[in-house]
Amino acid sequence: MAVQLGFMPPELYAFIMGDTSEELTNTPFPIVDEEITVPMEPTGGKYIVKLKHEPLDTTFILVDKNAKPWDETDETPASGKYILDGDELEFVAADAGKALFVSYDYQAAKATRFGLPKTPVRPTYELIVSSEAAGEDETLYEAAIVVDKCKVMGSINPPQQGGTPQPVTVTFTILKPRGNNRAVDYTVTPIE
């Protein structure tokens, strides 16, 4: 049985994988390859780029499009060097228009964390799927499918990162039901 979800929240993914999610506060969070461009014109006489977040000390790396690292300096930077002050980078006119990539950790106020258990075991579930359906006469129905006992099968992709959430299909295998229960119940009721 395949179920298509419009969105899979991280907590549901963790649950399906046999783990729990954890809410964290003030925790380091990585940013990898934030793309920046040195401005063509200075602001207040300086070529400044503002980062999305303020990097934590010792985690900052800046490279050019060829992955060549640039060096940090405390003095007026020369070409191929920069000054990092909080969440701002300062460059020189010779580097105007150059595309660069930065990676760093920052202090996230809130984050949700989960992972795969050391020994993953996919638990069994009672699965309830509710939706709406239309009959042949165009009558609308609320529909519910109840699977007494099932387990997620196959690969399970983690929640999509970035962009517009895409549908996720989760495939379940129906297992022998508990006691005298039916393996699957399907119930509909007209929407009034």
Image (cartoon, helix red, strand yellow):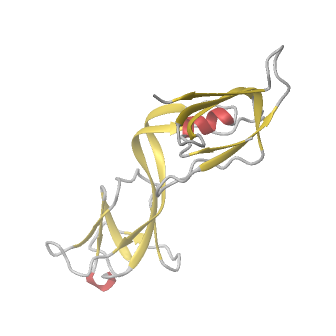
Q: Quadrant of the N terminus?
A: top right
Position of 27 relative to 155 (above/below): above
Q: Quadrant of the C terminus?
A: top left
Place residue 19 in its image quadrant. Answer: top right
Front residue of 190/98: it is 190
Q: State the count of labels.
A: 0
Q: Residue furthest front?
A: 137
Q: Residue furthest bottom?
A: 94
Q: Residue furthest top?
A: 179
Place residue 8 in its image quadrant. Answer: top right
Position of 157 relative to 22 (above/below): below
Q: Residue furthest left?
A: 44
x 59%, y 40%: residue? 135
Q: Position of residue 99 (x, y in %)?
A: 40, 77
Front residue of 165/128: it is 128
Q: Is residue 138 left or right of residue 108?
A: right
Q: Is residue 155 left or right of residue 43?
A: right
Q: Is residue 171 left or right of residue 140?
A: right
Q: Position of residue 132 (x, y in %)?
A: 54, 37
Position of 50 relative to 118 (above/below): below
Place residue 87 in its image quadrant. Answer: bottom left
x 26%, y 83%: residue? 93
Q: Position of residue 30 (x, y in %)?
A: 49, 52
x 60%, y 43%: residue? 136
Q: Position of residue 173 (x, y in %)?
A: 80, 37
